[in-house]
Image: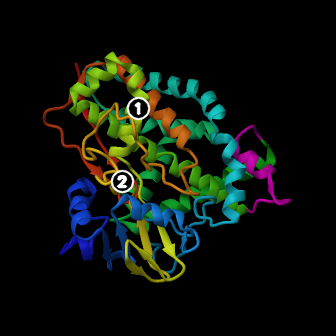
Amino acid sequence: MRDWATDFDVGNPDYESNPYPIWDELRDTCPVAHTDRRGGAWLPTRYEDVAAVAYDTENFSSRDVGVLPPMAGTSALSAPPITSDPPFHTAARRLVLPFFSPRAVEKLEHTTRSICLELLDAIADAGIGTADAAGDYAQHIPVRVIAHMLGIPEDDEETFTDWAIRIFQNTARDPEDGRAATKEVLAYFEGQVEERRREPSDDLISFLLETDMDGDPLTQNHILGTCFLLLMAGIDTTWSGIGASLWHLATHPEDRDRLVDEPELIPSAVEEFLRAYSPVTMARVAVNEAEVGGCPVHAGDRVLLNFPSGNRDPERFDRADEVLIDREENRHFAFGIGIHRCLGSNVARMEMRVAIEAWLDRFPNFSLQSDAEVRWGGAQVRGPREVPVVLH
């Protein structure tokens, strides 16, 4: 690294482990950074600049939302609706919205709580007084919930987790393996789709096979891409959110104790954890000559929607670098903003709330192990990969 303003690298270990001082410096000196690394990209760091790009669907396309560009000789994966532009996007999103409505999510809460309790029982039954709040708990919850929604075997959880790690956490260092994992996911869903063609079920995959857009059935690529999106986007993002929340509570006993005493604050705490530890950065591709924060952007340029930095912007949030679990005004965009605002935000919020409620009910007094080395990582989805805690 020479200069974060002109040579940044989202896969740099320093950036993945602690980007906050980097963003602070850039906001003050060069709020829209640029790099020629990894195919080149722009990195806005202010809330208003990130929002402007997200809303501008005329000049910025979602055809490739990956923070890292496709490997040479390959094209970006089509995963409707997230990789779609209007007007196709509107119809593709409308198809699956009912599965993520508040009413549908309410029906998922019992399943989610049962998953959490089963995991907590296993931790307690181990009887060793320690646990990895990320590896033993957080990472399992969203995998099992989304498997339930898609109707795919929960017994394949280890495989799903392996794919998420290879695609979202390791691709910056091993893009070929990330590409291979992507192919494995698509091949898996090809098999699942063929099973539903022979024997339909009451699940989301069967719904995609049976529905249509403007009178035409969905293409195979549309179905596979949507399944890929729902599985992969629903795993690492939410487990990173849960893991970051438990890491914060393990390192801030005053907030932990307050939530134990005032559990009614957990929903507002979830919103604050989402703001302060936003896991997701997305990308857009300029389709016309445009500007980002006054910087000229050319057609074909990649712009990274740096939601995590925008959520730490002191021009937008009072005491932006402090975590205030009772923050009253909190218009964060951890779930994005504009037409591509996260389809699964209701599910993620519910999973985070239930996971924290269940953990604090079972382990109200816990702390980070004194010799713990917590590794934060992920260019596209950032979160703590281990949270070793002592259960007092």
From the viewer's side, name the closer residue of 109 and 85.
85
Task: Note whether 246 is above or below 170 in the view shown.
Answer: above
Residue furthest toward the left?
Answer: 371
Circles 2 and 1, Cβ within 8 Å, touching? The answer is no
x, y percent for residue 372? 18, 38
Q: How many marks?
A: 2
Residue 36, quarter of the rendered image: bottom left
- Give the left or right position of residue 88, taking residue 257 as reference: right
From the viewer's side, name the closer residue of 177 and 135.
135
From the viewer's side, name the closer residue of 322 and 125.
322
Task: Note whether 72 is above or below 19 in the view shown.
Answer: below
x, y percent for residue 304? 41, 66
Residue carrying label 1:
268
Provide the secondary structure element on which disc 1 rests. helix
Amino acid beneath label 1: Ser
Amino acid beneath label 2: Pro
Residue at point 63% right, 55% down?
Answer: 226
x, y percent for residue 295? 37, 78
Res 155 seen here: no
Q: Report the span colored magenta.
A: 201-219
Screen quadrant of the C terminus:
top left
Residue at point 51% right, 55% down?
Answer: 337
Membership of 209 in magenta stretch: yes
- Give the left or right position of residue 158, taking residue 367 as reference: right
Number of residues whose C-alpha sits closer than 10 Å to that of mark 1, classed few (under 14), some (14–19) or many (20 or more):
some
Res 198 seen here: yes
Residue carrying label 2:
308
Residue at point 57% right, 70% down?
Answer: 63
